[in-house]
């Protein structure tokens, strides 16, 4: 099947109704880089600061995934501690810190049941980078989001109405329902639940064995 590139990113945003969101601190704990000393990743591994880190509540319950940079800020501010680390190190002006793989909050935080942001990245993770119409897996850059019930008919930008779609299926569906376009969903889009959250965490950290004992594979 030919993978059609389709329209630009601006058209994706227009179609899905999603807009880039500013970073939001975990449970109201806002990141304040100015209050901490600068952290620098080794020059040979600049991506280390964006690597995923599993966040546990004080009760060891997995509640979120964040980036190394954010995790280090929480640790330096005394909000969290490392439970698992990697071999890499980052350096401040006075110390070297091992890069965390899993951190735990030192104080219990009440986390709303639906705390995972609705975003293109999370929808693609939920759908495993698989077009929900033709069933083929694609690179993230070759997928867009489709409103099952078109926005022109009142369809909302929600977990229950957005699915991953390749450009060819998206163009074929157009401003119609799947039934009208002769398409069949591989599975109905699911609302966000604890199961969905754990699934996303497992997908994000599937290469890190240190996450396994906290996510109950």
Image: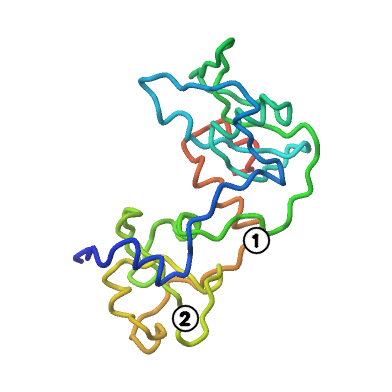
* Residue farthest along the left direction in this orientation: 2
Residue 166 is tagged as none
Question: In the picture, residue 172 is in which quadrant?
Answer: bottom left
Name the residue rendered at 34%, 68% in the picture: 11
Name the residue rendered at 47%, 70% in the picture: 17
| 3D distance between C-alphas at marks 2 and 1 | 24 Å
Name the residue rendered at 52%, 70% in the picture: 189
| 199 relative position to 78: left or right | left
Nearer the viewer's eye, disc 2 or disc 1?
2
The kind of secondary structure element at disc 2 is: helix
| 75 relative position to 108: left or right | left
Q: Residues within 10 Å of mark 2 (few under 14, many from 20)?
A: some
Q: Percent from the top left, x then y, of residue 217?
A: 59, 44
Residue 151 is tagged as 2
- Colouring scheme applied when the structure was drawn: rainbow
Quadrant in which the N terminus is drawn? bottom left
131, above or below 202, in the image = below
Question: In the picture, residue 3 is in which quadrant?
Answer: bottom left
The kind of secondary structure element at disc 1 is: loop
First reached walking from the N terminus: tag 2 or tag 1: 2
Closer to the camera in the image, 140 or 91: 91
| 125 relative position to 77: left or right | left
Which residue carries the number 1 mark?
193
* Residue farthest along the front direction in this orientation: 34
Question: In the picture, residue 180 is in which quadrant?
Answer: bottom left
Closer to the camera in the image, 10 or 67: 10
Closer to the camera in the image, 155 or 76: 76
């Amino acid at each position: 099947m030919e993978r059609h590139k389709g329209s630009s990113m601006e058209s994706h945003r227009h179609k899905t109704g999603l807009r880039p969101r500013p970073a939001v601190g975990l449970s109201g704990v806002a990141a304040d880089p100015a209050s901490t000393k600068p952290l620098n990743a080794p020059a040979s591994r600049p991506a280390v600061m964006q690597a995923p880190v599993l966040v546990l509540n004080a009760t060891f319950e997995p509640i979120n995934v964040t980036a190394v940079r954010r995790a280090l800020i929480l640790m330096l501010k005394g909000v969290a501690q490392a439970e698992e680390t990697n071999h890499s190190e980052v350096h401040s002006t006075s110390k070297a810190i091992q890069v965390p793989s899993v951190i735990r909050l030192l104080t219990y935080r009440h986390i709303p049941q639906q705390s995972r942001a609705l975003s293109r990245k999370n929808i693609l993770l939920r759908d495993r980078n698989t077009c929900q119409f033709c069933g083929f897996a694609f690179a993230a850059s070759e997928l867009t989001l489709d409103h099952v019930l078109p926005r022109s008919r009142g369809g909302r930008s929600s977990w229950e109405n957005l699915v991953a779609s390749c450009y060819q299926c998206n163009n074929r569906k157009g401003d119609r329902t799947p039934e009208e376009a002769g398409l069949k969903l591989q599975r109905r889009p699911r609302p966000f639940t604890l199961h969905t959250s754990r699934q996303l965490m497992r997908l994000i950290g599937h290469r890190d064995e240190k996450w396994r004992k906290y996510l109950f594979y």
